Every structure is written in structure tokens, then in C-alpha cells.
Image: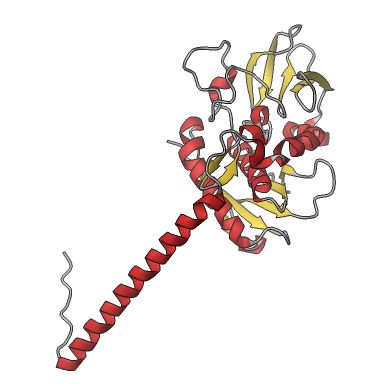
């Protein structure tokens, strides 16, 4: 059981993302974090929706949904002047698109808040030896093709700690949906980042719009000058990431039931709750009137 609870605040400052949708997505992310991510990564978290930034309590990490993120690489996770993480999420008229982005950013912030957590392993590049992999749990299978749904909301797949195992083993889960089937695998629309122990250079295996994944040499990353490693890497991959996410539910095989399909049952359930509430209130009024007519006092309830 995780000792600390990490608290996220989801806020829309977008003209195209209403607060009602923020409430739906925050509920889905809360369930995903508690049911799916928490047991696998030993993380306890809350995800709450707030109407504006000024409502966010101290100690929460903010996730801002904005229309005007126009600079390449500005979306993603950053740190404030106190060194605390916050996320900028590009708004979209498609609920599937921005909810998938929010899930991606939320989980990467929960697992590695400060963008520099690494795990040692063997480099995917044949001429390299040992490497330090940056822990970005959603990146290798970040594309919408491998997403799934919670409460009808599209959310991101994520890898498990076994993703960095030295060899493939039968019966081992490498990502939540099972899209990743072996250690250090990268799927179309995704990528993996690591530091080569020998040269100190950061490398990536990326699969953006090509027939096969490719290797990129990012060189040495000066974190003092450029920010944490994740922030630097995100600036170079955000374009590919947004294209992979933008496909939304239309490409996802594991998405499941849509929010639209769930809505009729939700409407029926709400009507049932309202009808039952009316019955209770009407019964209480009748009981109160009967007691008033007889002049009798209502019997005291005995606490047991």
C-alpha cells in the first residue's frame, strides 16, 4: 500500500471543453488510477475536477486544459517555480482525444512526477550495452490504437514494471491492455527513451509514420540548462504523440463501450433515483401531516 497519496486537479480553461466533461473525465481517471494503475505501480492517487485554478487546494498538482497551447512542445508536464509538477493539456472538440491526453499526462506525472526516474536494462540498440531507461509509462503504446475505456471515456494504455525485464516470459503482463507483448517493445505511434551508459548520450526508438521503428541520437542532455529529461524529450516528440492520439476511438480495438452508449442507462438510472426520491419525500410529507392532524408528536428515534 502506497504511503503517500498524490493528488491531481483537472481544470478546463478552454472554451470548447465544458466543466461537465471535465467532471466525467476526472471520474474516469480516478477509477483508472485506483483500479488499474495503483495495484500495478503501488501508487495511491486522487483526481478531482475544479472549475478554476483558484479553487485548487494547496498540495494538488494541476492539469490545465487550454485552447491556446500554440508553441511546439509546450503541452506536457512541467515544473513550477517551487519544483512541483503541473501539466498543460491541449483542448480538443473530441472528448476522446483530450481525455486520452489527460490520462497519458496524469499517469506519467503519478509514476514519475519530476521527469528523471530511470530503470537500468539492456539497450534495444544492438551495438550498445547497458542503458538507463526513462520511466514514461504511456509512451511505447501511447497511440489511440491501444487505448481502452473507463466509464465510456477513452484512456491510455500504460506499461508495467515487467516492461524492463531482461527477457520475455510466458504469462507476464507488459502493459495493462496487453498491447505490449514483450520487454522494451515500441508500437506504431510510440517511443522509448534511454541514456547509453558508455557515451552518456540519450537515445530513442521511435515509430512515427514509418514502416519500422527508428533510432535517434539526442546527444547529451543538460538538465540544468534545459529542464528535466522528460521535458526535453517531450518537446521533440510532441508532434508525433499528438498525431498518434488524435485518431481517438476510431482506431482503438480495446476501447469498449462509448460514453454515448452508456448515456441511455445513465438517464434511466437518474430518472429512477428522482422517482424514488419523490416517493420518499411524499411519504415524509404525508407522515408529517398525519401527525400534525392528531396533535401527536413525532416519536423520538432511538440510536442503537
* In-front residue for pair 85/141: 141
Residue at 76% from the left image edge and 35% from the top image edge: 234
**Residue 184: quarter of image:** top right
Q: Position of residue 226 (x, y in %)?
A: 82, 35
In what quadrant of the picture does the N terminus appear? top left
Vertical side of 88 occupied by 194: above or below: above
Determine the residue positioned at 27% across, 79% down: 284
Tell me if 97 is positioned left or right of 155 in this view: right
Residue drawn at point x = 72 percent, y = 48 percent:
88
On the rendered structure, is 221 left or right of 258?
A: right
The image's colour scheme reads secondary structure
Image quarter of the C terminus: bottom left
Asked if residue 295 shows in the view, the reply is no
User: Is residue 279 something that shows in the picture?
Assistant: yes
Nearest the eye: 94 or 125: 94
Residue 268, position in %: x, y?
Answer: 43, 61
- Tell me if 293 is positioned left or right of 17 in this view: left
Residue 206 lies, in percent from the top left, at 76, 24
Q: Quarter-wise, where is residue 233 in the image?
A: top right
Front residue (pair 197, 224) = 197
Q: Can you say whether 108 is above or below 218 in the image?
A: below
Q: Position of residue 164 (x, y in %)?
A: 59, 19
Compared to residue 211, the image places residue 266 above or below, namely: below
How many marks are shown on the rendered structure? Answer: 0
Q: Quadrant of residue 269?
A: bottom left
Q: Residue at x 18, y 87 (%)?
A: 291
**Residue sticking out furthest to the top:** 127
Amino acid at each position: 500500500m502506497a504511503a503517500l497519496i498524490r493528488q491531481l486537479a483537472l481544470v478546463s480553461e478552454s472554451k470548447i471543453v465544458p466543466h461537465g466533461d471535465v467532471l466525467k473525465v476526472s471520474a474516469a481517471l480516478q477509477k483508472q488510477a485506483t483500479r488499474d494503475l495503483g495495484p500495478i505501480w503501488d501508487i495511491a492517487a486522487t483526481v478531482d475536477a475544479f472549475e478554476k485554478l483558484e479553487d485548487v487546494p494547496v498540495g494538488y498538482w494541476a492539469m490545465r486544459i487550454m485552447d491556446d497551447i500554440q508553441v511546439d512542445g509546450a503541452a506536457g508536464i512541467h515544473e513550477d517555480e517551487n519544483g512541483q509538477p503541473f501539466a498543460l493539456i491541449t483542448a480538443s472538440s473530441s472528448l476522446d482525444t483530450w481525455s486520452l491526453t489527460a490520462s497519458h499526462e496524469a499517469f506519467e506525472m503519478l509514476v514519475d512526477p519530476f521527469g528523471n526516474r530511470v530503470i537500468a536494462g539492456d539497450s534495444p540498440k544492438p551495438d550498445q550495452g547497458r542503458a538507463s531507461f526513462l520511466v514514461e509509462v504511456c509512451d511505447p503504446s501511447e497511440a489511440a490504437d491501444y487505448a481502452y475505456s473507463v466509464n465510456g471515456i477513452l484512456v491510455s494504455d500504460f506499461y508495467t514494471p515487467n516492461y524492463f525485464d531482461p527477457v520475455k516470459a510466458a504469462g507476464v503482463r507488459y502493459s495493462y491492455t496487453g498491447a505490449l507483448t514483450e520487454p522494451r517493445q515500441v508500437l506504431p505511434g510510440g517511443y522509448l527513451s534511454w541514456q547509453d551508459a558508455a557515451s552518456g548520450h540519450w537515445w530513442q526508438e521511435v515509430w512515427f509514420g514509418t514502416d519500422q521503428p527508428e533510432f535517434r541520437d539526442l546527444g547529451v542532455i543538460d538538465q540544468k540548462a534545459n529542464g528535466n529529461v522528460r521535458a526535453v524529450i517531450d518537446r521533440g516528440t510532441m508532434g508525433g504523440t499528438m498525431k498518434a492520439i488524435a485518431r481517438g476511438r476510431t482506431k482503438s480495438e480495446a476501447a469498449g463501450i462509448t460514453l454515448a452508449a452508456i448515456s441511455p442507462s445513465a438517464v434511466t438510472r437518474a430518472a429512477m433515483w428522482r422517482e424514488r426520491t419523490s416517493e420518499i419525500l411524499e411519504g415524509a410529507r404525508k407522515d408529517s401531516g398525519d401527525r400534525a392532524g392528531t396533535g401527536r408528536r413525532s416519536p423520538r428515534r432511538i440510536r442503537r
